[in-house]
């Protein structure tokens, strides 16, 4: 049986297969803790933003403020225990699907960790020239964003029904109606994972990860945008992603002297 803390954070009634996730009392207790970006009664998709502001980091300023090196920071054992417990509960929230299961989520999470590793190469004395060149174009990411990428990889298919969103729409399933027939499985995964993350047992983990409301709001926004980006079949979402990509990485164009300039995307390739 699934644990009661695998719940959807919306209050729309679910069908019998999802009633075991319904826990409105928990929602009521946690609603005051949610960042202001969360619109109870709306949908996760309503929260997607085109641009998420990232913190500006300058190594010189960090050195002058005596900010400790990440390797020198020691977390309380309670934080590690809460992370392990969270991951264990996340596993129970996955269904026994042929593909969209916890094994798949684990593979995605490990791949994400591997893909993110070159971004920290600037701090690595053994980094190759190729790694350092990549770092020049990705500019590194802050620890919260780094954690969020792995977090989203782990939770992105929680409670996936095992069938495409289009199938849920054709069957007029309660989930399809709840999420307005858009990114159904993805929105449901965010709702369940977010509600789980705000359980009281993970209080210290949340405070360590996001000690300020501003950081919690940014964490929420990163989670929403990242998991919604996994719906690769929705036409509207795909067009929005392509537009953002074109804005971030313009196609090659000849400059005023006729020389073709390469975008960061092409240099990385």
Image (tube, rainbow, N blue to C red):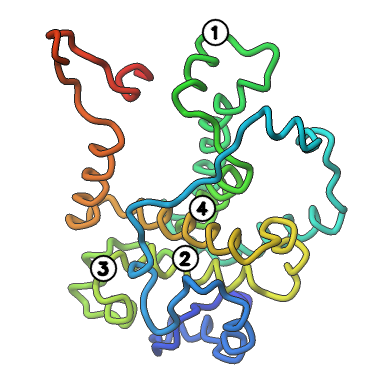
Relative to 30, is 38 on the left or the right? left
- Image quadrant of residue 83? bottom right
Q: Check disc 4 and report the residue beneath it.
A: 152
3 or 2: tag closer to the N-terminus: 3
- In this view, the residue in front, 2 or 32, is 32
Tag 3–tag 1 contact (CB < 8 Å): no
How many residues crowd around disc 1 within 10 Å: few (fewer than 14), some, or many (20 or more)?
A: few
Mark 2, secondary structure of its residue: helix
* Quadrant occupied by the N terminus: bottom right
How many residues crowd around disc 4 within 10 Å: few (fewer than 14), some, or many (20 or more)?
A: many
Tag 1–tag 4 contact (CB < 8 Å): no
3 or 4: tag closer to the N-terminus: 4
Q: Check disc 3 and report the residue beneath it.
A: 182
Residue 133 can be seen, yes or no: yes
Mark 4, secondary structure of its residue: helix
The spot of residue 47 in percent (x, y) is 38, 67
The spot of residue 214 in percent (x, y) is 58, 62
Q: How far apart, in angstroms, are the residues tagged by discs 4 and 2?
A: 9 Å
How many residues crowd around disc 2 within 10 Å: few (fewer than 14), some, or many (20 or more)?
A: many
Q: Check disc 2 and report the residue beneath it.
A: 190
Q: How far apart, in angstroms, are the residues tagged by discs 1 and 4?
A: 30 Å
* Quadrant occupied by the C terminus: top left
1 or 4: tag closer to the N-terminus: 1
- From what the image shows, is residue 197 above or below residue 226? below
């Amino acid at each position: 049986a699934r644990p009661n803390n695998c719940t959807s954070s919306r209050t729309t009634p679910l069908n019998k297969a999802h009633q075991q996730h319904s826990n409105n009392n928990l929602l009521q207790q946690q609603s005051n803790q949610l960042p202001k970006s969360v619109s109870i009664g709306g949908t996760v998709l309503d929260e997607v933003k085109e641009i998420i502001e990232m913190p500006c980091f300058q190594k010189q300023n960090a050195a002058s403020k005596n900010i400790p090196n990440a390797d020198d920071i020691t977390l309380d054992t309670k934080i590690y225990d809460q992370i392990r417990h969270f991951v264990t509960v996340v596993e129970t929230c996955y269904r026994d699907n042929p593909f969209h299961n916890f094994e798949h989520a684990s593979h995605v999470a490990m791949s994400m960790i591997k893909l993110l590793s070159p971004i920290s190469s600037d701090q690595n004395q053994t980094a190759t020239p190729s790694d350092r060149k990549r770092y020049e174009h990705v500019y590194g990411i802050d620890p919260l964003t780094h954690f969020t990428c792995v977090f989203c990889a782990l939770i992105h298919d929680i409670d996936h029904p095992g069938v495409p969103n289009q199938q849920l729409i054709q069957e007029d399933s309660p989930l399809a109606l709840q999420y307005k027939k858009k990114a159904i499985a993805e929105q449901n995964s965010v709702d369940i994972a977010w509600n789980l993350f705000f359980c009281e047992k993970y209080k210290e983990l949340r405070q360590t990860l996001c000690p300020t409301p501003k950081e919690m709001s940014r964490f929420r926004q990163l989670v929403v945008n990242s998991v919604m980006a996994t719906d690769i079949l929705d036409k509207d979402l795909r067009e929005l992603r392509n537009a953002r990509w074109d804005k971030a990485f313009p196609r090659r164009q000849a400059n005023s002297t006729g020389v073709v300039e390469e975008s960061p995307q092409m240099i990385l390739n």
